[in-house]
Amino acid sequence: MPFEALDLYRIEDELSPEERIVRDTVREFVEKEFLPCVVEHVRQDGSFPLNLVPKLAELGIFGANLQGYGCAGMNAVAYGLVMQELERGDSGLRSFASVQGALVMYPIHSYGSDEQKQRWLPALARGEAIGCFGLTEPDFGSNPAGMRTKAVRKGETWTLSGTKRWITNGSIADVALIWAQTEEGIQGFLVEAGSPGFEARDMKGKFSLRASITSELYLDDTPVPEANRLPGLKGLKGPLSCLTQARYTIAWGAVGAALACFDEVLRYTRERVVFERPLASFQIPQQKLAWMATEITKAQLLALRLGRLKDEGKLHHAMVSMAKMNNVDVALNIARTARDMLGASGIVDEYCTMRHMVNLESVRTYEGTHDIHTLILGRELTGFDAFS
């Protein structure tokens, strides 16, 4: 049966015709191209359907909200709806697009030189090049300021040494944006695949995000030309501004995962007969479905308002933290509840709910954990920094 999105508050009426077309186009792509193949990739460990990259590029998904350089130039709400539909398919699909656009293309677009923009942005938009974002380290996730990766300048060349972990697309990337400590603060460097001393190794054994490639990056005195340093910004503000863009996509994407679980369990409870009645006719399932619908509706409204504020240039990072924290938490609890309501059927991959559930465990952790976003909001509300 075709997917039917929950829309109790007529949010559809708040979307422009262009925004609806964008959403419906990506929804159709996910239905026809991605969902038929995702289970096979999940059954493998760290397999992503790379054959779909040209089709994603053709839809204008990579760097969709950026202007120029072959990018689609969508507004923030249309961009968010794209991420919602991608994550309705799988968090790994949204992560692929999110890393490419928000974590690689955005910083090049915002902080790169003209030469870097001309070289990389059109290729990344067309899917002819794949990028990854190297910030997290084995011992520094929530505290990126403590990173140990170093960059030392020697004339017109920088030498980078360090390790990055939990890097989406690392082993298939043509370029890695590596953040490193320098004498002048944290700076970003575009490290090309095949550079001496640079190696990417896939991480295996994941229970979550199995349809996504996750890697460790190793840099051992890797030479990087000065021309590959992002000149536009120094300090932690650079990578944090990229994370704000990525967290925005997660706030929308989590809604997509929740919608997928709700749609599946609603259909199941209508059709599943217990004690000679449909499961959906009993009070406890109805209470759970009503709670899910209410939380999804609140998450939809939060994401929509966030998108409108972004389009108006009024976005603040604390707003993004609230939306990421709330929407992922809601989606994960909905997935857990839906899996329980599916009974034994909920543990097999014929159903999507458990796949979303285990994916959302990772989404709750990356791009700032639930607790970190709580503290970001706490600092914004009180003026006191509780991080240390």
Image (cartoon, grey):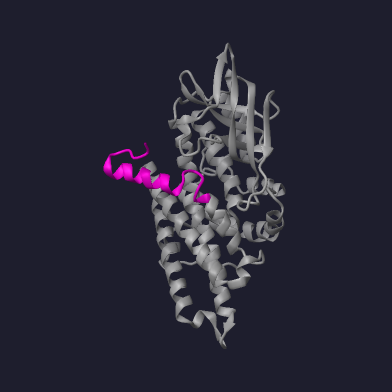
Q: Is residue 26 visible?
A: yes
Identified at 54% across, 31% down, the residue is: 108
Lateral position of residue 193 relative to residue 361, left or right: right
Is residue 140 or residue 70 the one in the foreground? 140
Q: Position of residue 168 (x, y in %)?
A: 61, 42
Range of the magenta residues?
363-388
Q: Quadrant of the C terminus?
A: top left
Residue located farthest toward the left when viewing the structure as drawn: 382
Residue located farthest toward the bottom when viewing the structure as drawn: 276
Lateral position of residue 129 relative to residue 309, left or right: right
Q: Position of residue 258 (x, y in %)?
A: 51, 61
Q: Quadrant of the N terminus?
A: bottom right
Identified at 66% across, 42% down, the residue is: 203
Identified at 68% across, 25% down, the residue is: 195
Give the total of numbered labels: 0
Whether residue 366 appears in magenta in the rendering, the answer is yes
Considering only vertical position in the picture, is 121 above or below 86? above
